[in-house]
Image (cartoon, rainbow, N blue to C red):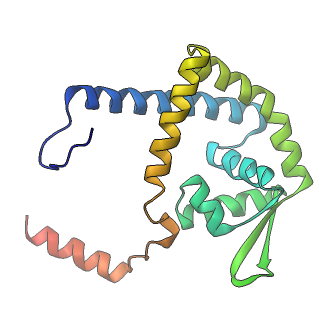
Amino acid sequence: MTDTDDRDGLRPEQLGTYFALMEAVNLLQHAVEQQLRAEVDLSYVQFQLLARLADAQGQLTMTALADGVVYSRSGLTYQAALLEKAGLITRGPCPDDERATLVTITDTGLARVAAVLPGHIQVVRQLLFAPLSEEDLDHLGDIMNRVRDHMRTQPPRSAAPRKSRTKLIRTTTNSDTNL
């Protein structure tokens, strides 16, 4: 079932599902963030970056990281600098692509991920998986994979052209006069 008329609002069951999803995601992310801060003093995005690097056998380009965690380029650069300063990652030129920066997780970074994983798993099990049956889990996994895959058909954020500051200022100024 699809809605083709963008002028119509969401049906009540669509709106309810949207709000329930967003609230659940926010509650889970908040609990995970608290656990990460308390146990290893990492932000949620820093954990995501380290976990993705660990899962990728230790190395990814900055672009692959940005696309994987759906984070802005500038935000990722800032977070990577913090992780590098803490000795959790290193950054350097990519041997296969001179335009790319290769990010590598250090042994210290791997140890930090290993230290936080038991608590992270406990939070996720308790909040996300505890109320689900195996059948629910299969259905939810199928649904969320389809939704994610549909969303991923759009160009990655890293492929979007950057807006020039002058164009942004000009647009803002012009729109301000039309109020």
For the N terminus, the image quarter is top left
In the depicted structure, whether residue 165 falls above or below residue 67: below
Which of 134 and 116 lies nearest the eye of the viewer? 134
Q: Position of residue 139 (x, y in %)?
A: 51, 27
In the image shown, does 11 or 125 lie closer to the viewer? 11
Residue positioned most to the left: 178
- The percent coordinates of residue 50 (x first, y second) are 75, 50
- In this rendered view, identify the residue nearer to me: 108 or 135: 135
Residue extending farthest right: 107
Pinpoint residue 28: horizontal percent, then vertical percent. 55, 29
The structure residue drawn at horizontal position 72% and vertical position 30%, both measured from the top left corner, is 120
Which quadrant of the structure image shows residue 131?
Answer: top right
Q: Please tell me how many numbered marks the rendered image carries.
A: 0
> Residue 82 falls in which quadrant of the image?
bottom right
Depth order, front residue of 153/48: 153
Residue at left offset 25%, top offset 42%: 2
Name the residue rendered at 56%, 32% in the picture.
Answer: 141
169 with respect to 31 (left or right): left
Residue projecting furthest to the bottom: 98
Vertical arrangement, residue 145 with respect to residue 20, above or below: below
The C terminus - image quarter: bottom left
Q: Residue at x 72, y 51 (%)?
A: 52
- Location of residue 78 by image quarter: bottom right
Relative horizontal placement of residue 158, taking residue 93 as reference (left or right):
left
